[in-house]
Amino acid sequence: MSARPCLVLPLLALCLCAAPQLAGATPGTAAVAASPVEAFKTAFLDAYWRQNPDMAVAMGNYRYADRLPAPDAVARKADLAFCDRWLRQLKAVDVPSLSAQDRIDLALIRNELEGNRWALTTFRSFEWNPTQYNVAGGFDLLLSTEYAPLETRLRTVAKRLKGVPAYYAAAKASLGKPTLEHTAMAIAQSRGAEGVFGPDFIQKVEGSKLSPVEKKALLAAALQAQRAIAGYRAFLQGLESRLKTGGARPFRVGKELYEQQFTYAIQGDCNGEQLYRRALVDKEKLLVKMDELATQLWPAYFGAEPAPADRLERIGRMIGKLSAKHVAADQFMTEIRRQLPILERWVTEHNLVELDPTRPLEVRETPAYSRGIGGASFDGPGPYNPSAKGFYNVDPIEGTPEQKESFLREYNDYTLQVLNIHEAIPGHYVQFLHANKSPSLVKAVFVNGAMAEGWAVYAERMMLESGYGGNSPEMWLMYSKWNLRVVCNTILDYGVHVQGMTEAEARQLLVREAFQEETEFKEKWHRVQVSSVQLSSYYAGYSAIRELREDVKARRKDRFDLKAFHEELLGYGGAPVRFLRELMLP
C-alpha cells in the first residue's frame, strides 16, 4: 500500500514536470526568468508539458488538456528526439558554476531525460505491458477537478474524446509479446475505464449548460470512446487466449534491466543488489526485536502455556492473537475516516510537522480503472492546482468470508493505524502539502519514488517514536511486523526479478518469515509480477532518511529540532535523499 505505484507504467511516467503560466499556477511560477539557468528550466518545462499533455493534467496543468496523442511509433520517435535535443542542450550548461539548488534541478532533468530514453530504447514496456494504455485517469481528473466551470471542462473532454479511437488503435499496434500478468490486469482495468463515461458522466453532461447540439455530440463521442475501450479489451482477451498456449513474455525483467531501472528510479547511493543485501541484515535485526516483544507479551495473552521453541512460530502465534482485533468489513472505510482527525491532533500537539487544514483530503473507493496493484494509495494534487482534493484510495474488500477475514486480520486495529499514517497523516498527504510549496518547481514535480515512499515509511516510525500508540509492546510488535513488510518488499522484488524466486519461495518469505496473511501474500505476489523496482523504493528511501536524520542530528547537536528537520526535508519537494543530504549537510 502506497502512493500510487508508478513503476508498472512506462518509465516515461515515473516523474512529471511542469510549465509556467497556466490556470491555477502557484504564485510566482509565471515570473520572467532571472538567470540563464532559470530560462533553461522554464523553456524545458514548457516544452515537456507540450510533449506530455496527459502527464500535465495529472500535475494540474490544463493548458494542453484537450490533446490526446496516439501512443504510436511516430509519437515514440518524437519522444526520443525530444530527449536527445534537451540532453544536447544540457551539455552546454556550465554546471560547476551553478548553485547546489540549480545543479540538483539539472541533475533531476537529466535523469528524467536519460531514464525516458532508456525506457524507449531498452526497456520498451510499450511492447509488453498493456496496462500502460489507459485513457481513464486523464478524463477522470478533468471531470472531477473543478479547475474551471463544468462547461469549459466538458468542452475540453469533447476535444480529447476525438482521439480515443486512434489511441487504442495505436495501443493494439504497439503491443508485441505481452506478459500474461499485465494482459490480465489490463483487461480488468479496461472495464473500469469504460465506467468513466457511464451514468455519472451522462448526468454531468445532461445537467450542464452546454447547448443541445454540444450535448448530443459529446455523448456520441463518449459512446465511441467506450466502444474503443471495449474493442481494446476484446483484443486483449483474444491475445490472452493465444498467449496461454505459449509465447508470452516472462514477467521477470532480469538482472541487467532491473539494475538499470533501479538506477533511474531510486537515484540512491547503492545498486539493487547492495540494497537487497542490506535488507537481509535488517530482516534479521527486526526478527530479533520482534522475538523479544513476543516473549514479553506471551504470559499476558497465553498464560502458563509454554511458548513454542521455534522463533518464527513464537512470533507468529503472538501476532496471530493480536491480529484478531479488527473492525468489521463494512466499517473499514468508516474507521479510516474516524482516525484521520486523531492523527492530525497528534501531529499538531506533538509539534512534528506543519499541517494545512485548508487542503482537502477525501477517502474514497479506488477507481476501478486503476485497481490491481496495492490495496490502498494516495493521489495528490500537483503544484499548479494545490487546492484540489487529495484522494486516499482504498480498494473494496471483496471475496469469500475467509478472504475478507484474512484481509482484516492483516489490517487489524494496530496496523490500520500505521496504514493511515503512511497514506495520509503525516505520510503522503502531508508530503504533498509541503512539496507543492517548494520554491523549486523542478523539485516539486520530479518526485522521486524512493523519497516519497521513504517519507511515508519514516513517518510511521517517527509517530511511534513520539509516543503514538502509548509505547505499548503490542503496538511496537505490530508496527515491527509492518516494517518487516517494507524490508521484505525489497527481498521479494530483487529475489523474484533477478534471482528467479518462485511463488512457493515467496510464500515462505512473506507468510512464514514475515507473518503476512494469505490475502496479503497473494496481493504482493501479483504486485511483484506486474511491477519491478517500485517495491524496493520503500526500504531504499526509509533507510536513507533515517540515516540522514541521525547525521543532521549529530552535526547540529543542541540546535537540532525535529519539526524543523521534517519541514526542511519536505520543503525541497521530492528530490532524492542523496541530493537532500548535499543540501542539508553542506
Image (spheres, rainbow, N blue to C red):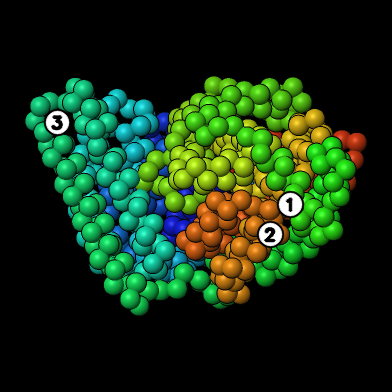
Location of mark 3 (residue)? 215
What kind of residue is marked 1? Gly
What kind of residue is marked 3? Lys
Tag 1 and tag 3, C-beta contact below 8 Å: no
Location of mark 2 (residue)? 512
Q: Secondary structure at mark 1?
A: helix
Tag 2 and tag 1, C-beta contact below 8 Å: yes
Q: In the depicted view, which residue is nearer to us: 20 or 333? A: 333
Q: Indicate which disc, 2 or 1, sits on the residue closer to the N terminus.
A: 1
Name the quadrant containing residue 187.
bottom left
Q: Is residue 540 above or below residue 444?
A: below
Q: Secondary structure at mark 3?
A: helix
What kind of residue is marked 2? Arg
Give how far across and how far down residue 251 sits, in percent.
46, 69
Q: In the depicted view, which residue is nearer to us: 222 or 198? A: 198
The reply to whether residue 368 is in sight is: yes
Tell me, for residue 400, which label it has, or none. Answer: none
Q: Is residue 501 left or right of residue 49?
A: right
The reply to whether residue 550 is in sight is: no
Location of mark 1 (residue)? 316
